[in-house]
Amino acid sequence: MAKTAQLTFNGQTYELPIIEGSENETAIDISELLEKTGLVTLDIGYKNTGATKSAITFLDGDHGILRYRGYGIEDLAEKSTFLEVAYLLIFGELPTTEQLKKFTRDITTHTLVHEDIKKILDGFPSTSHPMGVLASLFCAQTAFYPESLDPNRSAEGVYLSIVRSLAKMPTFAAWSYKNAVGHPVNYPDNSLDYCSRFLKMMFALPAEHYEVDPVVANALDKLLILHADHEQNCSTSTVRIVGSSKASIYSSISAGINALWGPLHGGANQEVIVMLEAIRQDGGNIEKWINKAKDKNDPFRLMGFGHRVYKNFDPRAKIIKKAADDVLNKLGINDPVLDIAMKLEEVALRDPYFIERKLYPNVDFYSGIIYRALGIPVDMFTVMFAMGRLPGWIAQWKELRENKEPIGRPRQVYVGTKSRPYVEIAKR
Ligand code: ACO
């Protein structure tokens, strides 16, 4: 017999269906609650609201588990590549050699962006944050590929938009940086792999020879895998909700880029380095900063700590911490902020404030340290995150479309002034 939950309201009992996921997650289906009872549910910040049924990513915050399409993040980070993971997320299965070859070839042939996009880029002052530039250039693709606006686009058309998104993202990302430093842009070198191509566009200068360091390219590939999807977080939910209005893939993802920008989401990796630098310049007094984070009258929070879902540990943080150590060793870099980060983590994890609230380092705590070692400037950290998250956003947008989900439209409980007569300005 199908399971139900009972709700009693105003002396009447209602049966609500129970939905079970493939990993035994159990949910009460309230989709007919309003119709049956006149009640809406209230859950500010969607802390316990399932907005969709998704087959892409499984996350168990209590046990620190993260899987893409059933594959553990640890295995993927160690054995796979970013484009293979992108294929997995978007199409549901790991590609065969032939499928991956074709996918890579398709992406490689679309890396160039329309020359007129450079004119848009030229309109941005060099003071522009690269995230704003990235979101704008990404959305501008709707102008260059107006067929993408068709909500009933064929599967081939959607595939082309997906390939274009993945192909042009590193070009936009590198150009957003070139704009910030006032350098001429570099065009994509299609003889290189995905990450090396990005690195060359980002770092090569016209007057100098630039050779991509494979240690740097491999570390970047791993970071992108770790960021590739994370189920219904703030930016992904934004992509899905914008996509649910049948907006194009480019505008939906551009909205996701904007959502990711905030310091409580993807912007945290930038804030972590700012914080670690401030602690270093302040003499490295860890206790003082821990106390600041605990003080409710002080707005300071330990950036890179805490997570809405992970209440045990963030599996990505474990992998990144080790990768940070490896990369710094391989590149022969001794970054004093790594020591500060490790001390900060050690002290926080022993402190009852952090223990009681289940606050652990998240993915952003160590990722900034690797980015810094790779030579990526702080303002570009969130752009790197966006580059990594792109396959996840695409997969979620595609799933929503294929499942023919309705437009996203939450309810509210109105707490404002009741109806009142209009007062003429002279009488106010
Ligand atoms: N430093 C100090 N205290 C914290 C921190 C922190 N980093 N994070 C949470 N807390 C405290 C809160 O003050 C609150 O305390 P209280 O119960 O005494 O009021 C309690 O822990 C619960 O915090 P909430 O903000 O309610 O938790 P929520 O799930 O809403 O927020 C979030 C999660 C936004 C990640 C939060 O932990 C935070 O601000 N962390 C710092 C920013 C950060 O690292 N963001 C990146 C997240 S990962 C990502 O997006 C990729």
Image (cartoon, helix red, strand yellow):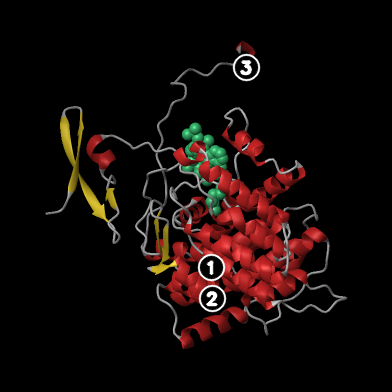
Q: Which-is-in-front pick, marks 1 and 3?
A: 1
Q: Is residue 124 left or right of residue 275?
A: right
* Residue where numbered disc 1 is placed: 225
Quadrant of res 369 = bottom right
* x, y percent for residue 295: 59, 30
Residue 105, above or below 22: below
> Looking at the image, do the residues carrying marks 2 and 1 touch, with CB atoms under 8 Å apart?
yes
Foreground: 162 or 381?
A: 381
Q: Amino acid at mark 2?
A: Thr
Which is more N-terminal, label 3 or label 2? 2
Callout 1: SS: helix
Q: Which corner quadrant holds the N terminus? A: bottom left
* Residue where numbered disc 3 is placed: 425
Residue at the extreme top of the image, as rendered:
427
One can see residue 185 in this view? yes
Instruction: Please name the residue shown 74% across and 76% down the image.
Output: 187
Q: Is residue 18 left or right of residue 138?
A: left
How packed mark 2 is, by other alpha carbons closer than 10 Å (few <14, some 14-19, many 20 or more), is some
Callout 3: SS: helix
Q: Amino acid at mark 3?
A: Ile
* Residue where numbered disc 2 is placed: 81
Residue at the extreme bottom of the image, as rendered:
98
Q: Which corner quadrant holds the C terminus? A: top right
